[in-house]
Image (tube, rainbow, N blue to C red):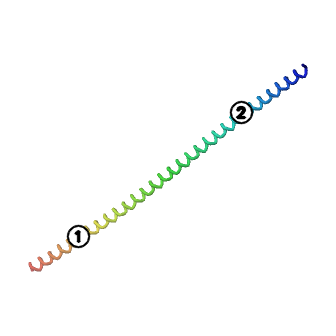
Amino acid sequence: ENELAKEREETMRAKSKARDEENQVRVQLSEEREAMRSVDQLRRELAEREVGQAEASDAARNHEEQLTVKLEETKIELLRLEVSVRQATAKEQCSAVNAEQSLTVLQQEVQ
């Protein structure tokens, strides 16, 4: 009966030890799962940041391209205005020459 009691006690200790080990394994698994969730979350955040940076970079590049186009359009408009000014100046000079010629003709006719 003593031996039977000892065996029961050893069996109880073994079961208790097995339960403790099982609980430790469960705790470790839980911690590992939580760590994996954290890693996954960090990966998602990093991917979101990378996407955000790529989008910001694309937006900046698009804005730069728009500004470049606007600058080129402004240069073209400036050239058009320069041509218009030159044409107007040429017309004024022609008018002045014509007026001088007319005056000369009139003076000659008067004489």
Q: CA distance from mark 1 to mark 2?
A: 96 Å
Instruction: Identify which amino acid the numbered label 2 is placed on.
Output: Arg
Left or right: 105, with 11 as reference point:
left
Whether 32 is drawn above or below 96: the answer is above
Q: Are marks 1 and 2 in contact (CB under 8 Å)?
A: no
- Specify the label residue 91 is tagged with: 1
Left or right: 14, with 98 as reference point:
right
Asked where in the image residue 42 lies, by quadrant, the reply is top right
Residue 104 vs residue 76, the one in the foreground: 76
Whether 4 is drawn above or below 55: the answer is above
Position of residue 21 measured from the top left corner of the image (x, y, whole percent): 77, 32
Left or right: 76, with 1 as reference point:
left
Dot 1 crowding, Cα within 10 Å, few <14, some 14–19, many 20+ = few
Instruction: Identify which amino acid the numbered label 1 is placed on.
Output: Lys
Residue placed furthest toward the top: 1
Dot 2 crowding, Cα within 10 Å, few <14, some 14–19, many 20+ = few
x 53%, y 49%: residue: 53
Left or right: 100, with 87 as reference point:
left
x 57%, y 47%: residue: 47
Reading the image, the residue beneath label 2 is: 26
